[in-house]
Every structure is written in C-alpha cells, then in structure tokens.
Image: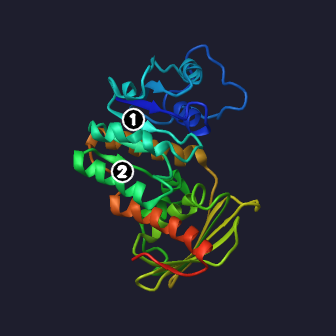
Amino acid sequence: MIRLGLVGGAGAYHGRAFSALINGLAEGQARPEGWPAFTPQVEGARIVSVWDPDRGTAEALAQVFGIARVADRMEDAADGADGVIVTDDMTKRHHHRAKPFLRAGVPTFIDKPLASDVEEAAELVDLAVKHGTPMMSASSLRYAKETEDLRANPGALGNILAATAVCRGELIYYGIHPLELAVSILGTGVRSVQNVGREGQNVVQIDYRDGRSLVLIVYAGISSPFQLNLYGDKGWRQVVVTDSAAFYSNLLGKVAEMCHSKRPPIPYAETLEIIRILVAAQRSLYEERKVVIG
C-alpha cells in the first residue's frame, strides 16, 4: 500500500477530488453537498495524512474521507508517508510548498501548473535533481482515457502535421490542460510561440522544429469541453475529453507508481518545456511578437 500525504488545497476541488478517488468516503459519512461525486478508483494507495493552513478545513476533509492524521506542520504531512501530493489551492503559489519535501528526498507530485514562472519551475527541477528526489508535475489531461489508443499507437494517423487544442479559462492555469493533452501525443521539440489573440482570447501558434504546428485556443468566455483535433497524412481525429474520473484516477495511479518505483514518470525536460510554452504565449501576447524558445 502506497501511503500519501496531502499538502494544501484541502478546501479546493482537487484536494476533495483526489481524496474521493483514493480513499473514498469514510464509513458512515455522506458526501457534502457540492463536493466531487467520485468513488474510489485508485488501487494500492491511501491518503494517510493531510495538512492545510486552515486546520479546520483539513479536519473536515480528514473526517469525510477517513484520513487518519491531520498534521500540525506542513513538513509533518510526510511522516509515515511514501510520498506527498502538493495540491492546487487556486492561489497559483502552491508549488513553493514542495521545496522542503524535495530537499528531504520525499517523492513529490506538484499539482498543475508546476509554476507560472520558468525560473521557479527550473528551481524545483534543480532541487529534485540535486537531492535525487523523484518529482512529477502534470495536467491530468495527459492521461485522458479518450487518448489512450493514440498514445499506445502514435502512428495511427500517420505523421501528425497539424493540431488544434481548445479549452475555456485562463492561459497558464487552464491552458496547460489542452496543451498537455496535445503534447501527450505530439511530444516536445517546440521552436517558437506566437499569441495572435487578445487578453482572455488566446490564439497561440506553436511551431515545432520539425515543421509541425499546434494551435492552442484558450478563451475565457467560450463553452467548450477539452478538445483536441489531430491531422495526419493518413487520417485525422477529433478528441473530446469528458471522463474526468478516468483522467484524475489515471494521474493519481502514476503518482502512486512513482512513489513505489522512485522514478519520475515524465522527463523533467518535457515538464519544463510545457511551462516555457505557456509563459512564452503570455509574453508573446504582451510584447506582440513571436517568442523563440528552442
């Protein structure tokens, strides 16, 4: 059994969703109104401790999902655990909480995004490498059920020459989802990024060094599921991602696997390139120019 500590985000969606998918409701507990309606789907893992700056929020989460211990200090969430999950708390600053665990050699999952700043993201990777700590950061869309067949058979469409990836929301905080969905198929190797949209209406041209193109559309006001369109020289595919229980549980399964194997499941260079693309897209919008990243 892989034992996990949950760090921060006890009152946010991901903290509740991850706890539901790993632990499930404690005996005799009803799901509070408005909380994610997931059932346990991650085998061989359990959240055994939780810490949050608001202790009352941590205690409420622990009671609902049968988490055995509420830690007094953030660092104590790793006591008796095989790894920690540093959860998105919607401040976009949660990644700073990972540092003591990386220094201590505790396998660490940092919820998306790794950081909103390239230097801060690189600092976390450097800490992981320096201390030999397995670290992972990813959007759950990387593991969408709807793309499993394409990830298993990347040549199904022939050479993919162009793609579009779409979602609603903010560029870095939500745009990471369709971007990582696309990268899970296309891989890395981006040369340049140019945002030809407007604030809240991002249309990002992403050019690969080998000539492939990806257009990332992140609009604040649209009504759209996470969507990916792929165009190859032997076929094309539209992917609409709807099964959130599957992509969350698949992600958490990878976290548990990392804690067991002590090996990061995603190359750090790939994780950093995703952050570089998003930050470059924001910079391109503000500076009204193409940004070369590789």
Which amino acid type is shown beneath numbered disc 1? Val
Residue located 64% across and 35% down the image? 36
* Position of residue 79 in the picture relative to residue 218 (left or right): left
**Mark 1, residue position:** 84
Which corner quadrant holds the C terminus? Answer: bottom left
State whether residue 285 appears in this view.
yes
Residue 241 spot, x, y in % from top left? 61, 57
Residue 112 spot, x, y in % from top left? 50, 50
Residue located 34% across and 58% down the image? 268
Residues tagged 1 and 2 counted as in contact (Cβ below 8 A): no
In the image as oriented, which residue stretches furthest toward the top? 28
Up the image or down, 32 lies above or below 153; here it is: above
Please report whichever mark, 1 or 2, sits nearer to the chain's N-terminal start: 1
Q: Nearer the viewer, mark 1 or mark 2?
A: 2
Up the image or down, 131 lies above or below 174; here it is: above
* Position of residue 131 in the picture relative to residue 6 (left or right): left
Which corner quadrant holds the N terminus? Answer: top left
| Marking on residue 252 | none
Residue 183 spot, x, y in % from top left? 47, 66
Residue located 42% across and 28% down the image? 74
Which amino acid type is shown beneath numbered disc 2? Leu
Kindly report the distance in space between the C-alpha atoms of the residues bearing marks 1 and 2: 15 Å
Query: Between 160 and 280, which is closer to the camera in this rendering?
Result: 280
Q: Quadrant of residue 72?
A: top left
How packed is label 2: few (under 14 Cα within 10 Å), some, or many (20 or more)? many
Asked which secondary structure carries label 2, the reply is helix
**Mark 2, residue position:** 124
